[in-house]
Image (spheres, rainbow, N blue to C red):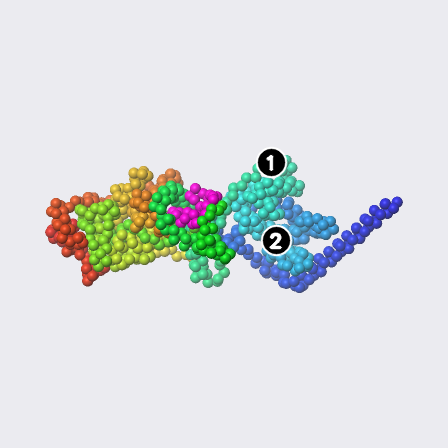
Amino acid sequence: MYLELWKKSKLLFILVVSGIILVGAGSAMYVGYVAVSNGVFGEIPSDDELKAIKNYQASEIYSADSVLLGRYYVENRTEVMYDNVSHFVIDALIATEDARFYGHKGIDQRSMMRVLFKSVILGQNTGGGSTLSQQLAKNLFGRENYGFLSIPVNKSRELIIANKLEHLYSKEEILMLYLNTISFGENTYGIELACQRFFSTTPKDISIEQAATLIGMLKATSTYNPRINLGKSLERRNTVISQMAKYGYISSGSADSLSHLPLTLAYNKLSHDQGSATYFREYLRLKLENWLKDNDATDSLNLYTSGLKIYTTLHSRLQKYAEESVHEHLQYLQPLLHDDFKKQGLFEQNESVVLKILKQSDRYKQLLDQGISETKAIEKLRKPIQTTLYTYDGIIDTLVSVFDSVRHDLGMLQAGFLVVNPHNGKVMAWVGGASYEHTQYDHITAQRQVGSVFKPIVYAQAMMDGYQPCDFISNQKIIYTQYEDWSPKNSDGNYEGKYSLVGALTNSVNTVSVKLAMESGIESIIKLSRNMGVEGQLPNSPSIALGAGNISLKSLIHAYTAFANSGKTVGINYITSVKTRDGKEIYFKEPSGNQVLPVEISQNITNMLRSVVDNGTAKRIRYQYGITGNVAGKTGTTQNHTDGWFVGYTPDWLGGVWVGVDNPIVHFSGIKNGQGANTALPIWALFYKKIENDKELYSLVKSEFQFPNSIDCEPYKEDSPFLKLFKRKEKRNNNTGINKDNKFNKNSNASSPKKRKRKGWLKNIFDGN
């Protein structure tokens, strides 16, 4: 009897306390609701504000063949319309997050009472209770800290906004506002990007089990992320599938079958520093930011939040082939360079350079901040530690000192590879370096010495001054006294005989190139270069003929469009269209071109460059790579083999390659491995072969030049016996190697252009003309 009385009293006590707590909680919620409604804790968004909701939306970059290359964003988000979302996503969402979604007006009283009882009375944090409309309110406007009043105030605020949303928007619109704003972790917002990132699909094509996986992540995006917690994500996916069966969206049999399927990802992270065309996207970003700054009169467009659609000239498969070609050749070339500079003792001879870089590192500065002396800090940095290194075989974990890791990075080869359509300047592929994650320095825009790839400009000016491709020039060595006794050297050490212009360019003869430049005048060479689009530092000296100027690959390709486009340059063009999120097109003016060379001269240069490929410094295109199509090109190698170049073109595309190391102290020691024909040309050739093996792109390498190759002359003639005797006598009498007719003194106007004049037969013998 007493026991039963005790039990009844205990039950009564619990009910009374529970009632008091519920009344107290309800009163608190009511007070909070009234206070929030009256603006005590800040204004509630008005109906007009809620109607004008615009989320931050990523701007997207598309290739010419409609492939998404990447995005610019603050929050990585792209909006999707209701009709483009599979009902699997909608069903999974409602079954899991808000089963009575279609039956309430933003507030589910049954769920609220359940959560209030379990959370407040039983102390069980079961979650739930918030409708999709309330969750949307939370996503859009966040929560504030009001101390002990935070829960009732924030909940009340969300209830009010949810109710307003339900009156302003249809159920379908609320669903899409929710799905377009919800976070799936990894800075990924909205169902569109979640589908792309985790399954490489679209919301319209997603499968049931994939939809269940993504909706399952919403409970805790890190805990149920299938990339990092596959097991937990699988369990959560199956819970969502069970909920779908519970509410009749799928049968129990289907749920059982789906639950036994493995969870397979097709992960596709499109970030700023990963994916395709990373260097191009960064270059584009800077250009677009500046353009919007200067041209957006309303100041309403933002590259990171306005959801712009950016359509580019880049072709996704050509970009892929270009990136592969760079990687494949550098992977082959890097071990050769490592072996070379080990034999040279390169870093031992230049340890001060390594130490200078080391002292700029964060690790070194941290040691100094700890009070460690410079000497002790360097000693510490020479001791091996566990670290990661970037290599062309992938990222490796290894035991190496910070000192040696600096040497490793210092010795890494880099490359730039730019491919354009020479007739309209449209960029087809852009590879600014070996790895954007490793270095963000774009070697397409970087200025480097260009070497012999500059020579065609010199020859073009010579022909504008009257020379013809079959005219012969003496190979005699000359010292230019007015330029501190500077004299060009030929790589083969030969200074006998005479070359035709085509023969000299084919074999990249330095003596002839300088003579042509001096006869035309350095100022004329510089003027033509600028007219052709060359930007950068050009020396006012004979060395300009050998490519001693610092020019970017982008600028050089701009100039070469004149050779490949009948004498007319075209600006580098990379955008076809930009549209706002509502489809309005933003105008972009395409770069215009200029006729800088007569058509005949551009054709002559092309035919001379074809000879370079067929018979000269670029002939490994034929014998090593088996390329038989129409190709014109020029190799280049700078002093000490620091920079390797190749620029080549077919009738349909023009490509330029630079290969080297960022710090010029690191280079090959010999011409065999260090020349542009070995460092840069193979990347171009590999790219060509990949196009040749692509059935859809095959036509790009099989077109023919639309003009005949009319150059038919010997490349080289030996000196006559009489001239050989004269040269030997002259050399004995004057060790400078300067004859009367070829001497340039300080008072001569060496830089002014002068038209070539026909000389008498005796002068022809000595000048070789």
Q: Which residue is mark 2?
A: 136
Q: Quadrant of the N terminus?
A: top right
Q: Which residues are magenta?
A: 387-415
Looking at the picture, tell me which residue is in the foreground, 29 or 738. 738
Amino acid, disc 1: His
Q: Is residue 408 magenta?
A: yes
- Inter-mark Cα distance, 2 to 1: 33 Å
For residue 632, side relative to residue 477 (left or right): right
Q: Position of residue 82 (x, y in %)?
A: 56, 48
Amino acid, disc 2: Leu
Q: Which residue is mark 1?
A: 260
- Label 1 sits on a secondary structure element that is loop
Q: Are marks 2 and 1 in contact (CB under 8 Å)?
A: no
Q: Is residue 704 magenta?
A: no
Chain-order first, disc 2 or disc 1: 2
Q: Position of residue 767 (x, y in %)?
A: 15, 51
In this view of the protein, can residue 563 be seen by the observer? no
Q: Quadrant of residue 21?
A: bottom right
Residue 329: numbered disc: none
